[in-house]
Image: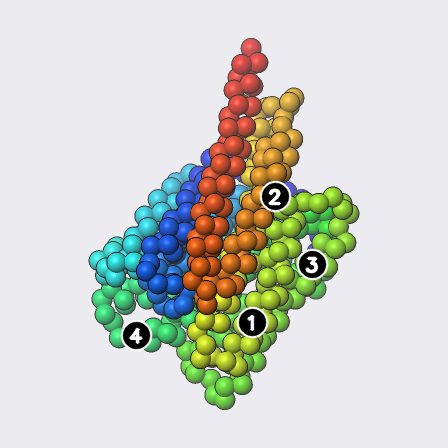
Amino acid sequence: MKTIPLNTQQAPPISVPLRFFTVAPLFLMLAALILLSGKYNPFANMHSPALLAATHCITLGFMAMVMLGAIQQIMPVVIVSPMPATRLTAWLAILPLIFGALLLAAGFMQGNPVLLDIAWPLLGLAFVTLIAASLISLARSPAHNATKTAILLSIITLGGAIALGMLLAHGYASGLLLPYDKLATAHINLSLGGWVLLLIIGVSYQVVPMFQLTPNYPEWLAAGLTPAIFFVLLLNLLSLLLEFRPNWLVIVVQGMFWFLASSFAAATLVLQSNRRRRIADPTLSFFRLGMVVLLCTAMLALATLFFPSNDRFVTLSAELFLLGFAMSLINGMLYKIVPFLVWFHLFRGGVKRAVPNMREIIPEHWMWLHLRLHRGTVLAAVFAPWWNVAVWFVSLGLLMQGMLLVYVLFTAISVYRRSLQRLEESSP
């Protein structure tokens, strides 16, 4: 698959994605504090209030915040179709997302149904706004490529995940008689296996060859991978809700999903091994870590199919996918996207001379430090379900990563503002 020439003329104002990016690390810090607040090991019980609250801080407050910010930049630049009413759409998404995520976490921690019942409509508003705007943008787009297909399928699975999440939150709050275990599993599958994985794959089709100087993904892989994953997710959803019998059908369906996810990881690692530039790069290392962890997660998840009674292994596979795979790639993409945005908007805004090099916008030594912190956090997460002390290391790692991200993001913003100020001072 060839990378698509970027259409930078329709890019949104830099403030649109940056407001999402700068809020996101605060939720990492909040997740760390929540994990430390409980008396017991939250990773020992996948239904513990602290683990539920911290997980939703990471998924809604950090991951979704970054991904929703990035998609508003990706739509006009990659598929040549800007979001409708860009600034209004951003505000209608970010404010209810912030308050909804905070209230949901508080509702889980306190067991307060009132907070849950306030949280789910706010979260629904945030995601419905972005989903509707994204679908309008996709419908208007003249592009026909694998990235567009991946984004469309990720948006569809996000809609299903949000609908199930709202139903679960309302059910917990009002005491509805629902098959909570099945719905929760379906919600997790569509959220992580659908929205997160499909969007990461679609963005990787462009980011990996462009920023990491690798060969392009093979045409057959790019064209067929995300539709195949989407189809398998639908089969998995049916097998869960309809209780397929015999049980081996469920194993086959889930095995197909992890085979496809592993194929993406393996293909990416092969491309990275053939990159044209051999200089060490922290963003590349984030990607490699994520792909290796995805392969390990696949093996662990398949093992849990044969030993489903051990909840701690199920918790561990979800942890690894969330922290080791998704967070690794999101961190790596942030360290490429943010410097590019600053450089691009300065250059487009008229700063032709003395535009800072992208390596100067966020110094690499901070990225290497973040990578080491993140590796330590993922390693601690492997032991957290069994070793109480590891919970402290996971929490400390998340806290320090959040603080570091706040610092480097505001460093990038200050570079942007200083450069604009020089432009204003030099203009007649």
Question: x and y percent of residue 52 in the render?
Answer: 37, 61
Q: Residues within 10 Å of mark 3 (few under 14, many from 20)?
A: some
Q: Given contact means CB atoms under 8 Å apart, are the residues at marks 1 and 3 in contact?
A: no
Decide: marks 4, 1 in contact (CB < 8 A)? no
Q: Is residue 211 above or below residue 153?
A: above
> Which quadrant: the N terminus?
bottom right
Distance of label 4 from label 3 (alpha carbons): 42 Å
Q: Earlier in the sequence, mark 2 or mark 4?
A: 4
Identify residue for label 2: 368
Residue found farthest to the top: 428
Quadrant (top left/top right/bottom left/bottom right) for the C terminus: top right
Q: Amino acid at mark 3?
A: Leu
The image quarter containing residue 427 is top right
The first of marks 4 and 3 along the sequence is: 4
Tell me the SS state at disc 4.
loop
**Disc 4 + disc 3, Cβ < 8 Å:** no
Q: Earlier in the sequence, mark 1 or mark 2?
A: 1
Q: Amino acid at mark 1?
A: Leu
Task: Kindly report which numbered mark, 4 or 1, lies closer to the viewer in this rendering.
Answer: 1
Give the CA distance from mark 2 to mark 3.
Answer: 20 Å
Which residue does the numbered mark 3 point to in the structure image? 269
Give the residue at mark 4: 178
Inspect the image, locate mark 4, and give the three-letter code of the amino acid beneath it: Leu
> Are the residues flagged by discs 2 and 3 in contact, CB closer than 8 Å?
no
- Residue found 49% across the figure and 72% down from its top: 313
Q: Is residue 236 above or below residue 112?
A: below
Q: Earlier in the sequence, mark 2 or mark 3?
A: 3
